[in-house]
Amino acid sequence: MTRWDKECLEMIAHETEKVIIVEGLSDKRKIEEILNEDVTIICTNGTLSINRFDELLDMYNLDENDVYIFVDEDKSGLRLRKQLAKELPHAEHIYISKDYREVATTPYKILASLLVAKHFTVRPFYLQYN
Ligand code: MG
C-alpha cells in the first residue's frame, strides 16, 4: 500500500457524519420520520452525567462529527442545551420557537423547514404536512 493509499483510507475513515442530539425517544422518532438521509440521532433523556457524556463522546465521535443540538425550548431543554454547548462548542443549534416549546408539539412542516435550513435532506411531503 502506498502512502497515498493510506492517506485516502484515513480520509474515508474520518469522513464526518451528522449526529443530532435530542431529549426523548418521541423526538427521535419524529425527526427520523422527516429526514430523508442517514443521520444518527441520540436521545439524552435529560442532562447528562460526566460519565454518560464521555461515553457518548467516544461512541459517536462527537468531537469530530457534525453535531446538531435539537432540544425543547423549556427549562430542561435549555439546561441540556447549555451543558452540551459547553462540552461541544462546535455543535450547531436548532431552536424550537417559543410558541411550540417542544419538538413533540411543533408541526412537522416547521420541524422539516428547520432541518432544511441546516441543509438536511427531508422527505418533501413533510414540508407541507402539519
Ligand atoms: Mg421538554
Image (cartoon, rainbow, N blue to C red):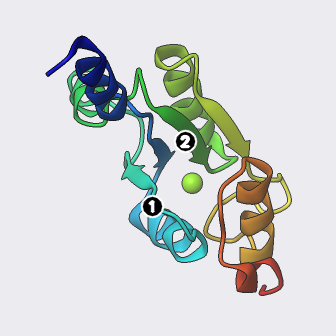
Q: Where 57 sits versus 28, above or below?
A: above
Judging depth in this view, the residue of 51 and 66 nearest the camera is 66
- Mark 2 vs ligand 1: CB under 8 Å? yes
- Figure quadrant of residue 46: top left
- Looking at the image, which residue sits at the far front? 2
Q: Where 108 sits versus 40, above or below?
A: below
Residue at image location 80% in from the left, 63% down from the top = 113
For the N terminus, the image quarter is: top left
Residue 22 x, y percent position in the rendering: 49, 50
What's under tag 1, amino acid-wise? Asp
Q: Where 28 sits versus 55, above or below?
A: below
Residue at image location 75% in from the left, 52% down from the top = 96
Evaluate if marks 1 and 2 touch, with contact meaning CB atoms under 8 Å apart: no
Judging depth in this view, the residue of 119 and 28 nearest the camera is 119
Mark 1, residue position: 38
- Figure quadrant of residue 107: bottom right
* Crowding near the residue tagged with mark 2, few <14, some 14–19, many ≥20 C-alpha atoms within 10 Å: some
Element under label 2?
A: helix
Judging depth in this view, the residue of 7 and 83 nearest the camera is 7
- Mark 1 vs ligand 1: CB under 8 Å? no
Residue at image location 28% in from the left, 33% down from the top = 56
Residue 10 x, y percent position in the rendering: 28, 24
In terms of sequence position, does the residue under pointer 1 or pointer 2 come before the other? 1
Q: How many labels does the image show?
A: 2
Q: Is residue 120 left or right of residue 55?
A: right
Element under label 1?
A: loop
Residue 76 — which label?
2
Q: In this view, does 9 lie to the left or right of 105?
A: left
